[in-house]
Image (spheres, coloured by chain):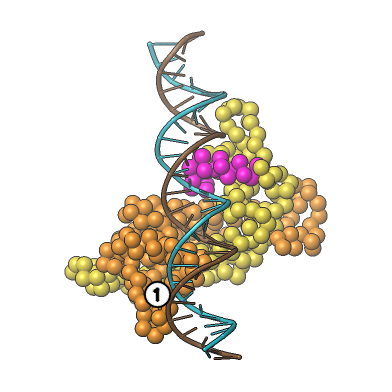
Chain colours: A orange, B yellow, C brown, D cyan
DNA sequence: CATATAAATGTCGTGGTACGATATATTATA
DNA sequence: TATAATATATCGTACCACGACATTTATATG
């Protein structure tokens, strides 16, 4: 197995998990990202306030993308906005009972999936971390040229 | 740590990896999904023909979504289409030298990222597979229904 | 071998989501 | 008080995934 194979296999495993997740989310009427936000909200450590910016960071998106997700979730009756006390600029979020119920169901499905597919994911991760032959193989296979320092800056 | 926290943490770790990946891909002028297709193509086992449908399956998307990605990759000079011999319906794909070069660079960055972030991912995965208290907690909190005996046995 | 059916790829229009640029409201600071 | 910083929100744009449908080639069947 080449480095590319192990990296590709890792991505494949991740995509399978996410594809599964998207499917069950949509089956409950939720868009995948909306489910993600709900899970992030519910999974927030107790000492962290559920602010918009906090959710955005954990979803690795810009705050205004989170705002849009929350608009749709709010319209669907899954979450509610609250204006907190201390800082009136902050908007704090809570799940509605409906949101709680759906999230619980989805989480059970996810746990089951992880139980069966998790080991393959871990195995793929370990392989992708272990192998180290990219440089050699490509230079040889493509006959491109010898690798030089300048390649390191290619992405700049 | 609750079940929701561990599931949320797993998603967070996955998103961090993907967010990193999207960033370096875009820095080379590639859209994230285009990079994914290239990696899938390069990482294909030798005995598998690089057909459109094959790539689509491994990317967990519909074949016509793959077609669109390939259109853009082809326009950018990253991959080439070939009509195979046996079955004239099939379109086989190859990376151009430009595609090979960029993919190699990206793969090196990804390996480095996995070296540092992989352990956190594995840890999150194991925690998400291990905990089992979803039913219990939600039922109690939402007042949805009575806990069942099996919930009481939840592990820690 | 003619035609129906299936398979592989491609086209078109739509919806969700992420983003940059920009706006508004509140808090902090000079 | 005026100014800057912070938190959230709005708007227009682009990417990508999809369903519905089309086209070309292969296969099955009478």
Q: Which residue is mark 1?
A: A91
Q: Is residue B115 magenta?
A: no
Q: Is residue B131 visible?
A: no
Residue at image point 79% right, 57% down: A147
Task: Provide the secondary structure element on which disc 1 rests.
Answer: strand
User: Up-down: is A51 above or below A19?
Assistant: below
Residue at image point 78% right, 47% down: A143
User: Up-down: is B6 above or below A84?
Assistant: above
Q: Is residue B62 magenta?
A: yes
Residue at image point 62% right, 44% down: B72
Q: Quadrant of the C terminus of chain A?
A: bottom right
Percent coordinates x, y for residue B144 in the rendering: 21, 67
User: Up-down: is B85 above or below B97?
Assistant: above
Residue closest to the far left: B146
Q: Is residue A98 left or right of residue A54?
A: left
Q: Is residue B43 left or right of residue B125?
A: right
Q: Is residue B19 visible?
A: yes
Percent coordinates x, y for residue B1 in the rendering: 38, 76
For disc 1, the neighbor class at 10 Å (few under 14, some 14 to 19, many from 20) is some
Residue at image point 68% right, 45% down: B76
Chain at tag 1: A
Prevailing secondary structure class for the magenta stretch in the rendered image: helix
Residue in front for this viewpoint, A57 or B104 = A57
Q: Is residue D17 left or right of residue B2?
A: right
Task: Write down the region rendered in magenta.
Answer: B55-74
Percent coordinates x, y for residue A18 in the rendering: 45, 56
């Amino acid at each position: 197995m080449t480095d590319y194979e192990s990296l590709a296999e890792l991505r494949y495993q991740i995509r399978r998990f996410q594809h599964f997740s998207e499917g069950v989310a949509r089956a409950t009427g939720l868009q995948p990202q909306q489910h993600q936000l709900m899970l992030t909200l519910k999974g927030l450590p107790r000492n962290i306030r559920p602010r918009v910016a906090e959710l955005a960071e954990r979803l690795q998106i810009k705050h205004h993308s989170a705002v849009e997700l929350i608009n749709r979730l709010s319209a669907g009756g899954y979450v509610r906005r609250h204006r907190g006390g201390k800082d009136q600029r902050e908007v704090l979020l809570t799940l509605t009972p409906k949101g709680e119920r759906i999230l619980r169901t989805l989480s059970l499905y996810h746990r089951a999936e992880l139980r069966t597919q998790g080991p393959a994911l871990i195995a793929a991760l370990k392989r992708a971390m272990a192998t180290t032959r990219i440089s050699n193989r490509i230079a040889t296979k493509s006959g491109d040229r010898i690798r030089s320092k300048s390649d390191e800056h290619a992405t700049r």
